[in-house]
Amino acid sequence: MKWVTAIIKPFTLDDVREALSEAGVQGMTVTEVKGFGRQHGHTELYRGAEYVVDFLPKLKIEVAVSADRLEHAIEAISTAARTGKIGDGKIFVGELDQVIRIRTQEVDVDAL
Amino acid sequence: MRFKRTMLVLCAGVATPLSAFAQTSPTPALNSGDTAWMIVASMLVLMMTLPGAALFYGGMVRAKNLLSVMMQCFSITALVTVLWMFYGYSLAFSTEGMHAGIVNWHSIVGGLDRVLLAGLTPASQYQTVPESVFVMFQLTFAIITPALIIGAFAERMKFSAMLWFSGLWLTFVYLPMAHMVWSGPGSLLGDLGVIDFAGGTVVHINAGIAGLVACLVIGKRRGYPHTPMPPHNLGYTVIGASLLWLGWFGFNAGSAVAANGSAGMAMLVTQIATAAAAIGWVAVEWITHKRASVLGIASGAVAGLVAVTPAAGTAGPGGALVLGLIAGVVCFFSATKLKHRFGYDDSLDVFGVHAIAGIIGALLTGPLASPKLGGFGTVTSLFGQLWIQARGVGFTIVWSAVLSLVILKVLDRIMGLRVDAEQEQIGLDLAEHEERAYNLS
């Protein structure tokens, strides 16, 4: 099982969610985050006082997938979140050791 | 009757429309139209402070200090009202001991014969309106002037120190200033011939200079200018500026103290100057920063309102247009460049907008009152009146700066002006009032 964390542009969320559903991913967690990568911030100007905003608002989505669905999931996120402009985000993939569904006590792939 | 009214208007153009002609000439009959208008005008000017200035300033501070700004405006309104009743009206508008052309103690400050509004009855009259309405109208000016100053020391002054400052400043700076300009024959600046229709010197230069002194004495906000301190809700600021614009018709047209042609023209030139200043500010901003900003157009409008205040009774539409444009352009530079150049933290640009636009307006009021420049005053010598205006401006600057400095230094010594670093960090709303403006979750 794999743990997929993606940082995406906020307005792509609906497309990403839809693409992941089509790829068979049954659940996800979304968090509003701020950060920076290669995309520069922007400046704001109030009566001549210029502020550089370094941290840009992004969304972090987290999904757990079985190893055989990983490529589909990555494909779905990459396609749906891609605008081709700097700041589209990143996908991080890690190992996932154990999953337990609290209600039924199912474990691992059955719990996904 | 018509002749008498014309005389009043003419005299108004020369010196001061608020002067106590009622006491030197036979009292004219009460006029219900004038009275109705002055009741409305008083409410409009009160609206400029609550909620006009409260929203205008409140939107520009950070979210953690919104309530402190609104509380300051609200509490100043209450405090000044009570002080006005106790002795404020008397010190500002008592004509006891005043004689035209004679400079004495009562040229500077009114007597105590009207303390606790002594002698005021429903039958008391000021010109053609009940004196009670005049007391109320002038009170709203006394309220907004200290309320304007709070923008300079926003986000860091102790509430208790702010209250003491506002009360003392009203007493020692505002009341004599209003008396010297508006109390009629025998007043220091009135006799000098200074034209200040609605309060360019008394209100705006006075408050603007006090703001500059206050922000210098109290010091910069922690982290200024390196920490970003962007306005937290420019929507509030736009609503506030809009209410100021609307309320200003009470301020300027109301200063005719009658519903007449002078009031109508004051309303029109106020509108024109305000629009011109908004355009002037934004035009320069568009050229220099490649963007037209919301805060810019709102600030420009306020600069125009300030600039036309002393001129509203005497300038013509063309003069108002030029005056507004100049004020908008110059205040853009004073609020966006001057402050950063010299590094003082006049947080919400009380000096950059009110003092600078006030000075521009007070000076240009002189020449623009001349019929040669489309004005409606009786000014014949452009430079002569400009010089008289300049003396009025210079006097106001020195008066406000020196007395404000003394009051602030004394208060700082006795009780301290600033909240401590931790309170400033968590914000005045929580630190001073144990409340939060936004509980969103």
Image (cartoon, rainbow, N blue to C red):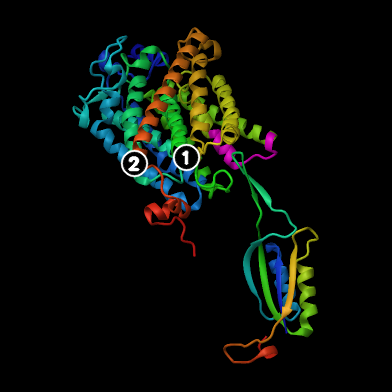
Residue at image location 54% in from the left, 44% down from the top: B224
Location of residue B205 with respect to B440 vertically, above or below? above
- Choose top left, top right, bottom left or bottom right for residue B114: top left
- Choose top left, top right, bottom left or bottom right for residue B54: top left
Q: Nearer the viewer, residue B226 or B296?
A: B226
Residue at image location 47% in from the left, 40% down from the top: B219
Between marks 1 and 2, how big is the CA–CA gap? 18 Å
Where is mark 1, residue-wise? Answer: B219
Q: Position of residue B326 (x, y in %)?
A: 58, 25
Tell me which chain the residue with mark 2 is part of. Answer: B
Element under disc 2: helix
Judge depth for marks 1 and 2 and give the one in front. Answer: 1
- Choose top left, top right, bottom left or bottom right for residue B20: top left
Specify start and end residues of the magenta stretch as a single range: B288-301
Where is mark 2, residue-wise? Answer: B163
Magenta span includes B80: no
Q: Is residue A58 left or right of residue B127?
A: right
Q: Is residue B79 left or right of residue B349?
A: left
